[in-house]
């Protein structure tokens, strides 16, 4: 791990499995600065507004008819059968500690804009290339992969928590990762699945998108080689509990990658005071 750079607006953290566990009880974990300010245009086509509206309407209709989430699966699947009611209740109780209903509603209302180059998530689209480059380099170092290979993450099981519209899941899938991506806002997952379905990449079309909180994957006993969660921790109820959940999803020998706004006067003034409050460039 490198040391954080005071001038950076965002901070990125790469933690190996052991370091991630130690970081939960120590505030001295070092962070590596991310090149988040680079204005690099995001690759990948946009889903038309009409298409997004149609998909969202269909998902909402399915939910009112008793279906579970946006997966189009009956309510008795994914542990929600009568026999799994207790497990589902435990998961709901656990997620209540981290999931902020107000934040979920806010992002659900903006879901149609995830891939709009001029929409609310324009800064995240612009940050996509440098963020992916950072993760690619760090993952190759950690797992001993050739960073110059066409698909350096080939075969790695990667989970993106708080995936939104799939802005990170898609490029990581193109690098060969076996992607699972979750978000508690089912509307965002609907958009992510619609965008992936129109991709020319079989790897992208194969992403496992789930409209569930991360706690549900913990309850299922799943784990992953790499767990990512970018610009999410500032939106949860209990950051420490959220980190504990993520840590439980990291397989032995795996790693966790996080990023958020840097806690410095300069980043507060630029990212929160200006970009969020005054200019409305990014969601608050």
Image (cartoon, rainbow, N blue to C red):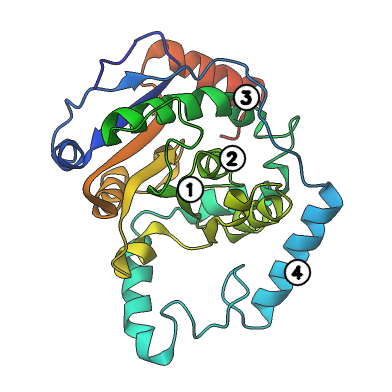
In whole angstroms, how far apart are the C-alphas of marks 3 and 1? 18 Å
Residue occupying the point 48% across, 25% down = 133
Q: Are marks 3 and 1 in contact (CB under 8 Å)?
A: no
Comes first in the chain, label 4 or label 1: 4
Classify 10 Å Cα crowding around label 1: few (below 14), some (14-19), many (20 and above).
many
- Decide: few, some or many residues near mark 3? Use Cα within 10 Å; few <14, some 14-19, many ≥20: some
Instruction: Give the residue furthest to the right.
Output: 50
**Mark 2 near mark 4, Cβ–Cβ under 8 Å?**
no
> Pointer 2: what residue?
167
Q: In which quadrant will I find the N terminus?
A: top left
Residue 222, image x, y percentages: 32, 63
| Residue 18 left/right relative to 216 | left
Work out whether mark 2 precedes mark 4 in sequence or the reverse, and give the earlier one: 4
Q: CA distance from mark 4 to mark 1?
A: 22 Å
Task: Reply above or below: 85 against 51.
Answer: below
Q: Earlier in the sequence, mark 3 or mark 2?
A: 3
> As rendered, which of 38 and 24 lies closer to the eye?
38
Q: Secondary structure at mark 1?
A: loop
Residue farthest toward the bottom in the current orientation of the protein: 82
How far apart are the alpha carbons under marks 3 and 2?
A: 10 Å
State the residue at coordinates (50%, 38%).
175
Left or right: 49 with respect to 177? right
* Residue 158, image x, y percentages: 40, 48
SS state under label 3? helix
Q: Which mark is residue 58?
A: 4
The residue that label 1 is drawn on is: 162
Q: Residue at x 76, y 41 (%)?
A: 46
Q: Which residue is mark 3?
A: 126
- Seen in the image, is 61 located left or right of residue 36? right
């Amino acid at each position: 791990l490198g040391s954080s750079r005071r001038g950076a607006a965002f901070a990125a953290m790469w933690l190996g499995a052991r370091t991630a566990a130690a970081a939960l009880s120590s505030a001295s974990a070092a962070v590596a600065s991310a090149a988040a300010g680079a204005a690099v245009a995001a690759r990948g086509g946009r889903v038309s507004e009409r298409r997004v509206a149609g998909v969202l309407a269909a998902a909402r209709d399915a939910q009112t008819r008793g279906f579970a989430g946006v997966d189009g699966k009956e309510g008795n699947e994914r542990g929600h059968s009568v026999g799994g009611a207790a497990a589902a209740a435990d998961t709901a109780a656990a997620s209540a500690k981290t999931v902020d209903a107000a934040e979920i509603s806010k992002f659900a209302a903006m879901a149609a804009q995830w891939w709009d180059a001029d929409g609310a998530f324009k800064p995240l689209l612009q940050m996509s290339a440098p963020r992916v480059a950072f993760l690619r380099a760090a993952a190759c170092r950690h797992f001993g992969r050739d960073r110059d290979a066409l698909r350096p993450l080939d075969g790695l099981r990667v989970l993106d928590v708080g995936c939104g519209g799939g802005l990170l899941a898609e490029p990581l899938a193109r690098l060969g990762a076996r992607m699972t991506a979750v978000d508690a806002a089912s509307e965002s997952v609907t958009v992510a699945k619609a965008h992936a379905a129109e991709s020319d990449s079989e790897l992208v079309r194969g992403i496992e998108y789930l409209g569930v909180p991360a706690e549900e994957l913990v309850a299922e006993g799943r784990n992953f080689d790499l767990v990512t969660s970018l610009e999410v921790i500032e939106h949860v109820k209990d950051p420490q509990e959220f980190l504990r959940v993520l840590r439980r999803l990291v397989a032995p020998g795996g790693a966790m990658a996080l990023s958020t706004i840097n806690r410095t006067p300069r980043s507060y003034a630029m990212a929160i005071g200006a970009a969020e409050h005054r200019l409305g460039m990014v969601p608050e």
